[in-house]
Image: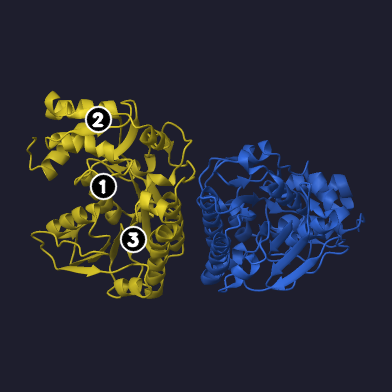
Chain colours: A yellow, B blue
Amino acid sequence: MHVLIIGGAGMVGRKLAQRLARDGELAGKTVSSLTLYDVVPATPPAAAKIPVKIVTGDLPTAGEAERLIADRPDLIFHLAAIVSGEAELDFDKGYRINLDGTRLLLEAIRAAGHKPRLVFTSSIAVFGAPFPEAIDDEFFNTPLTSYGTQKTICELLISDYTRKGLLDGLSIRLPTICVRPGKPNKAASGFFSNIMREPLAGEPAVLPVAESVRHWHASPRAAVGFLIHAASLDTGKVGPRRALTMPGVSVTVGEQIAALKAVAGDKVAARIRRQPDPFIEGVVAGWPRNFAPQRALSLGFKADASFEDIIRIHIEDELAGRIA
Amino acid sequence: MHVLIIGGAGMVGRKLAQRLARDGELAGKTVSSLTLYDVVPATPPAAAKIPVKIVTGDLPTAGEAERLIADRPDLIFHLAAIVSGEAELDFDKGYRINLDGTRLLLEAIRAAGHKPRLVFTSSIAVFGAPFPEAIDDEFFNTPLTSYGTQKTICELLISDYTRKGLLDGLSIRLPTICVRPGKPNKAASGFFSNIMREPLAGEPAVLPVAESVRHWHASPRAAVGFLIHAASLDTGKVGPRRALTMPGVSVTVGEQIAALKAVAGDKVAARIRRQPDPFIEGVVAGWPRNFAPQRALSLGFKADASFEDIIRIHIEDELAGRIA
């Protein structure tokens, strides 16, 4: 089986590539080759059992999607996107990458006529406030960002191309990834990870919102698990509604901090400094807090067991087991 | 106020043009000119009080949307579409007209920077079975046709362009138009109108489904009323969720026939011949039956008062008051 990861240089793409290169198989089928595509060269996974090809390019450029489909990947993970903040600031760039790129990919698949499995990462940004305390699987999509609009449109296109038998697609709506590795960034959601990652590394972190703020999380390891499960799933059980909200862990910031104390001790949690930021509080007030993702659960998608586990996964996967 | 109707040669476009040309004003503003655009030349409305310009062209052709926006229409009705059956049979044509045409129009408006009111006709095809007996305003969009997918995507784009302040858009989801004037056609939904229109004209008609089949209707006059109301509405009251399910009349086929008897007598209703067609019964089984369109009702959109009224409107508007 030939696997293509579009967005192979991103955080989730890298971890997915590592997992596939290590396992050498997926759902009982041998992965014969792995192509990592991105605008910058992806880092080849360490100790790969299988041939890995690194390809760089700009997906919405004419001929680019055809080039990627020319060697007929059996399984395509499409993770590439302009993130929410940038898509909001640069309207043309967001539509070009997040909508046109995906549509050109679907058209190249249709033209090649080989009907691969396509797993697309969508987002909880397809939902916009106001919404119920826990959003169920039949709640409507009213995105309040261009990014959320683009993700919703891609979901619709993938369902329609699937219904027409042109490919076998699934859109999975990832929770906010936590603990996100790397440096603190200026994303409004950054603090959910910062207040865990920085204290665990011996650094201070700023909490800009009240401890009562509730949000929806999945570890990077769980996100890779969702992608692998979506790639392995018997889609005959899914039916025509091909967009699925992934399960996650709904916790308040206060519960995040309690979990940090339980796993790493009071000394680590004391590195969090409260400094309310009305702008960030306002942005976060419009975000989903909780979901009732019954369809994904019944299809066997598995969330992290608890927020403590999310912290433990970060310590294992990013800190080699060591807390500062 | 300069008004542009895209799809001005279609049945609803023609009736809307007649109404605007007769009234000469809309929401207290004088209509200074009316442009009717379509792939075939629209018929100029009779006894127009205002200058009417007939323009023909193919909306998704390069430069065409810019040409339409060049004289800066203050109000645009976008009714043009490839219908459901044809969009399903010709995938490229459906996406080209129903998605690309709309997107090019939005981009031309954005480039011109003049922020018109845009009223777009969407459809109850944005919903796909299974659904509740009455679909409320927060039920999700799971179209089961390419046409429904394209309409949903246009709704999302119009909401996003509106949110960004690039135009002032509203998408209105029309019920099935009944009684549709003209000749019987082969659309699966055709019989809802055929069994009213043909008997009223002294002709036989075939009923291919059980009398228990329930569906959602609006007269052509009500549809024009929705468009005028959407053009006049204070959109400050609508908020960011710019797609609205229009109110309608939910009746069974048996209730349609009872209404025909009440309005036109048993002799007319006796011209309906029962001839079950399992194919049409199957198609219709997946269609919405009823809605709870609270948002549109609270914004002042008005449905026909009853199915009897729908029949009376047909007799007045199409038959000059005479039943055969």
The chain carrying label 2 is A
Say few, some or many: other residues with alpha carbon within 10 Å of mark 2 (under 14 / 14 to 19 / 20 or more). many
Q: Is residue A259 above or below residue A118?
A: above
| Distance (Cα) linking label 3 and label 2 | 34 Å
Q: Which residue is mark 1?
A: A223
Residue A128 seen anywhere in this rendered image of the structure: yes
Give me the chain letter of mark 3.
A
Residue A214 x, y percent position in the rendering: 34, 31
The percent coordinates of residue B261 (x first, y second) are 85, 47
Please identify the quarter of the rendering in which residue A18 is found: bottom left
Q: In the image, what residue type sits under mark 1?
A: Ala
Q: Is residue B136 left or right of residue B193?
A: left
Residue in view at x 20 percent, y 37 percent? A310
Callout count? 3
- Regarding mark 3 in the picture, which secondary structure is present there? strand
Please tell me how crowded label 1 is: few (under 14), some (14-19), or many (20+) other residues with Cα within 10 Å.
many
Q: Amino acid at mark 3?
A: Leu
State the residue at coordinates (40%, 45%). Answer: A125
Circle 3/circle 2 CB separation < 8 Å: no
- Residue of label 3: A118
Q: Which residue is drawn at the image coordinates 47% and 35% (left, top)?
A: A131
Q: Is residue B273 visible?
A: no
In the rendered image of this protein, does residue B137 appear above or below residue B316? Answer: above
